[in-house]
Amino acid sequence: MSWISHITREDFNRARRKAFIGQLLALLTRSTNDLLPFEEVRARLNVRGQRAIGSQTVPLDHIVGSEGRYADFDRQFAPLNEATMIRWMSIDRAHHEDVGLPAVELYKLGDIYFVKDGHHRISVARMRGQLAIDATVTELVVDVPLAPDLSMRDLLLKEEYSDFLAWTGLADLRPEQRIEFSEPGGYLALVSHINAHRYYLGQERGQVVERDEAVADWFDHVYTPVVEVIRATNALKAFPGRSEADLYRWIMDHRWFLRERNGGADPGPLVATTDYVRLFGRRSLANATERLLRGLREVLGNGDLAAT
């Protein structure tokens, strides 16, 4: 075996060990270290168009999926089986001998990339510590934001978001919108909110309100005021791991409850938000738990005294 063959084989073995460690950590942390399958991601999102954007230098850690070889490499593009060895070592050899390699071919969706051609080149580049790679990129235009930490669970939420935007047209009506939930089902609730708003708007005006107008009016005069209060009061700090959309949904339910309790008078976004945070925020629940425990201690203490 020549010295270069020995070096490239050792490099491949290190890459395989890296893959094994990655699989072990994923198992221990109950997380995933898999590449995302391009076809499934594309099928779950509404693609508005496709365009060639040419040559770019792409951050390697933004390449998180593959068109057809997502079972051969992990999320860091470490090789998962020996079948990749010969091709992997030949690419590694080219690096050691300073042989130029063609750009890889990628698909871009949001802020993430999927490999069309060049899996081994990306794998070797990551193993060698490169931060970026030259690529020829084709972009698929989607409305929902996609980040490099995207998981298959996240994709289910993105699918709901994509369908919501397709139904409402909100991405065109209000391009600045960013409505993201931390759990499934939220967008169906928003559709109900919009339909109800459209109905009452029509009743108020005495005429049918078109869907686009109702959607825009709901976003401007129902959703946005609540979100502005959430931001102004730092309400999210009381609900770790949750989003503005989560809190909007819960506050609107609480707002309805307060209105019914108060004989139909709308308390408005500020009162509904502050009251909800007071009752259900992390500090409020912690205080309530402490009061409950203190009460139990007092009851138990009195019981012990009575027994003596």
Image: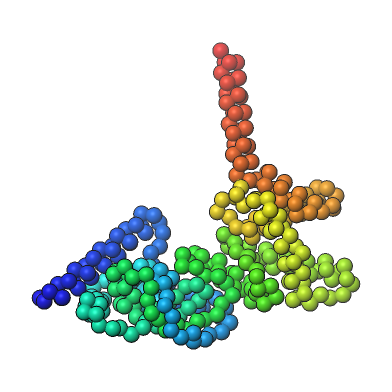
Image position, residue 34 (x, y; %): 39, 67
**Relative to the observer, which residue lies in front, 78 or 45?**
78
Residue 283 is left or right of residue 27, and the answer is: right
Quarter holding the C terminus is: top right
As displayed, is residue 27 above or below residue 158?
Answer: above
Residue 111 is left or right of residue 272, and the answer is: left
| Residue reaching furthest to the front | 98
Residue 214 is left or right of residue 231, and the answer is: right
Image position, residue 297 (x, y; %): 57, 26
**Residue placed at 74% from the left, 71% from the top?**
216
**Residue placed at 46% from the left, 67% from the top?**
148
As displayed, is residue 265 above or below residue 15?
Answer: above
As displayed, is residue 70 above or below residue 180?
Answer: below
| Residue reaching furthest to the right | 206
Residue 271 is left or right of residue 19, and the answer is: right
**Relative to the observer, which residue lies in front, 269 or 280?**
269
**Relative to the observer, which residue lies in front, 230 or 23?**
230
**Residue placed at 65% from the left, 73% from the top?**
175
The quadrant in which residue 74 appears is bottom left
**Residue placed at 34% from the left, 57% from the top?**
25
**Relative to the observer, which residue lies in front, 65 or 135?**
135
As displayed, is residue 92 above or below residue 303?
Answer: below
Image position, residue 232 (x, y; %): 68, 53
